[in-house]
Image (cartoon, rainbow, N blue to C red):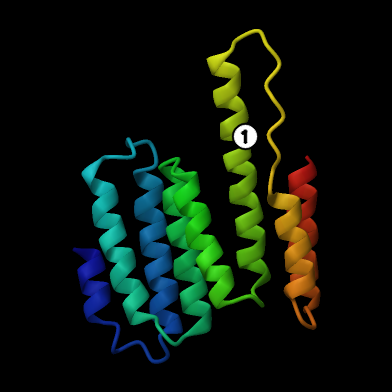
Amino acid sequence: QIYSQLYDRRQELSDGGQFAELAFRMVKIYTTLNAGRPANDPVWQKIQEQLNQFKTASQGNLDAEIQIDLLEADVLALRRMYPESEQVLRDAVTRHPQSARLWAALAWIQDRSWLAEVAAQAAAEPGTAPQPVASRAVETLDAANAALVDPSPDDRVTLQIARARHFI
């Protein structure tokens, strides 16, 4: 109900950015409260419906679109749907290649996916060393460095932290 009220008030919020920020906070809280639910729980469908409404309402506002894409990828990652989360971020990076936050999030989800693959291998064959599974995160971060034109100091720091997080 809160989401419906927020969606109804979107016209009152002047630039769409305020709307996206409120939407992001509300869905983030709701998602966090439901993080332990199974991936097929109906609550996730409701969250996805809200995200779709917020996507529609935030079209044309760069910051809002990026926030909503990041949130959608986060929701999918909480459901352990890493390939779908990665695809959302790949699509977002294609639309907004100058966003260091999107590139860093894509590298993070690729690392999470890699860890899940390694864990699955270890569980399938206990006592044996898992086959090497390459993480795509390094290639993604290299592509980000090549794609960003005139990155800001914040962009550089974002990518450096993402690279450091990958190697930890």
Query: Residue drawn at (57%, 72%), measured in percent from left and top?
Result: 94
Q: The C terminus appears in which quarter of the rendering? A: top right
Q: Position of residue 62 (x, y in %)?
A: 52, 82
Does residue 126 sit above or below 119 in this rendering? above
Q: Position of residue 2 (x, y in %)?
A: 23, 65
Q: Is residue 125 left or right of residue 16?
A: right
Please tell me in which quadrant of the rendered image residue 58 appears. bottom left
Query: Residue drawn at (30%, 89%), measured in percent from left and top?
Result: 12
Extreme-bottom residue of the structure: 14
Foreground of the two, 37 or 142: 142
Q: Which residue is mark 1?
A: 115
Extreme-top residue of the structure: 127
Foreground of the two, 134 or 63: 134
Please tell me in which quadrant of the rendered image residue 40 appears. top left
Q: Is residue 82 left or right of residue 26?
A: right
Secondary structure of residue under mark 1: helix
